Image: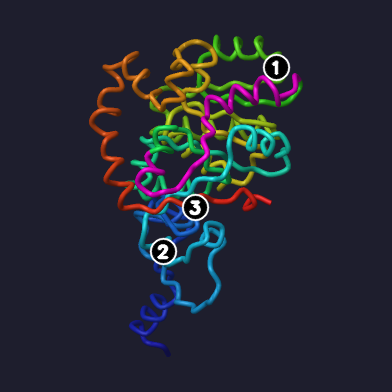
């Protein structure tokens, strides 16, 4: 006969330390955080998984794609920008198709600051298939401080180009954000016969039911040619990474911020001469100082110090082949 104490010890020995997907303390139920590959498998609130160390001489695919070692990727903040201008990436987007899912992020100065400070945001950027420099100011600053020349492909220019020159009338297009009037205006202006629109409520990213409704709408609208995520950062990147993790959506999603507002005239974009001089931020500040003063005048200047402590890597376009 086995004693009661031995039975209890044996029972404890076979119980796992962490449940992967059951209960409020599960790993799957915890908050997503950074990891070296950008996948969804690391969580900031979860107990550490006890995985035995394995010696390997091979680098991760992510580290290889940017020409660095995993040690550097883990120890330093590395800003990665893909080597695409507008014309080059428009050609890639035109042939992306809808038999797979990928998403595009468009970093500006505010995003670069968040990337440096927020491990979760870094994971969302690393999971993106394409990272396109949205800011001429940031591109010039990177060249001044790091000596790296970055091509610029702004989300606003890219969105307008795709709508005007790439998308066909019967292509399935999904638009997340903007009101019904904007959706009708865009459909009418660009002759879109198959536009699906969903506008999540304000603050939806903090409501699991609203997030699920948004994800479900996008997934059921697929496969799509393009899905424009225009709900601001970091909300749009959160939705994009969740779509990738769930593995249901098919097509190319683009995180485009206020691009639809510019196209529909809800916000006025800076004159071309100011854009070329990297002064678009100043024009937006003058248009809406109450909303943007803190972002541009208080938070924005931190980019000078943060870039000095970071690496910037121009990733060659061949990484998507």
Q: Badges 3 and 2: C-beta atoms under 8 Å apart? A: no
In the rendered image, residue 140 lying in the magenta stretch gets the answer no
Give the CA distance from mark 2 to mark 1.
46 Å
Between circles 2 and 1, the one closer to the viewer is 2
Read off the residue under disc 1: 192
Number of other residues with Cα within 10 Å of mark 1, as a class: few under 14, some 14 to 19, many 20 or more? some
Residue, x 29% and y 29% (percent of image)?
295
Between circles 3 and 2, the one closer to the viewer is 2
In the rendered image, residue 166 lying in the magenta stretch gets the answer yes
Nearer to me, 215 or 90:
90
Between circles 3 and 1, the one closer to the viewer is 1
What is the span of residues highlighted in magenta in the rendered image? Answer: 141-169
Please identify the quarter of the rendering in which residue 50 is found: bottom left
Residue, x 56% and y 25% (percent of image)?
157
Question: Image check: 283 left or right of 213?
Answer: left
Q: Position of residue 181 (x, y in %)?
A: 55, 9
- The color scheme shown is rainbow
Taking the view exactly as shown, the residue that stands out farthest to the left is: 298
Q: Position of residue 144 (x, y in %)?
A: 37, 43
Q: Kindly state the secondary structure of the residue where label 2 is placed.
A: helix
The mark that comes first in sequence, 3 or 1, is: 3
Read off the residue under disc 3: 40
Number of other residues with Cα within 10 Å of mark 3, as a class: few under 14, some 14 to 19, many 20 or more? many
Taking the view exactly as shown, the residue that stands out farthest to the bottom is: 1
Q: Kindly state the secondary structure of the residue where label 1 is placed.
A: loop
The mark that comes first in sequence, 3 or 2, is: 3
Tag on residue 66?
none
Tag on residue 72?
2
Please identify the quarter of the rendering in which residue 89 is found: top right
Question: Image check: 69 left or right of 305?
Answer: right
């Amino acid at each position: 006969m086995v004693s009661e104490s031995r039975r209890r010890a044996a029972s404890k020995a076979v119980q796992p330390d962490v449940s992967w997907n059951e209960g409020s303390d599960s790993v799957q139920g915890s908050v997503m955080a950074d990891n070296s590959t950008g996948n969804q498998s690391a969580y900031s609130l979860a107990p550490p998984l006890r995985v035995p160390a394995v010696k390997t001489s091979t680098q991760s695919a992510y580290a290889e794609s940017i020409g660095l070692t995993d040690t550097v990727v883990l120890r330093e903040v590395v800003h990665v920008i893909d080597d695409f201008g507008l014309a080059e990436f428009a050609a890639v987007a035109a042939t992306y198709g809808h038999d797979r899912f990928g998403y595009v992020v468009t970093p500006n100065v505010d995003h670069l600051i968040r990337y440096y400070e927020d491990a979760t945001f870094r994971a969302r950027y690393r999971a993106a298939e394409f990272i396109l420099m949205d800011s001429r100011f940031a591109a010039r600053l990177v060249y001044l401080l790091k000596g790296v020349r970055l091509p610029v492909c702004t989300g606003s220019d890219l969105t307008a180009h795709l709508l005007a020159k790439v998308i066909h009338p019967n292509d399935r297009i999904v638009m997340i954000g903007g009101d019904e009037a904007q959706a009708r205006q865009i459909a009418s202006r660009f002759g879109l016969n198959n536009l699906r629109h969903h506008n999540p409520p304000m603050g939806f990213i903090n409501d699991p039911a609203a997030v699920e409704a948004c994800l479900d709408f996008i997934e059921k609208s697929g496969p799509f040619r393009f899905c424009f995520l225009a709900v601001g950062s970091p909300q749009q990147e959160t939705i994009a990474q969740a779509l990738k993790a769930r593995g249901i959506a098919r097509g190319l999603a683009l995180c485009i911020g206020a691009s639809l507002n510019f196209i529909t005239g809800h916000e006025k974009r800076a004159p071309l001469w100011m854009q070329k001089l990297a002064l678009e931020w100043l024009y937006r500040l003058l248009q809406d100082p109450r909303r943007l003063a803190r972002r541009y005048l208080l938070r924005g200047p931190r980019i000078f110090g943060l870039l000095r402590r970071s690496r910037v890597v121009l990733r060659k376009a061949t990484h998507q082949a």
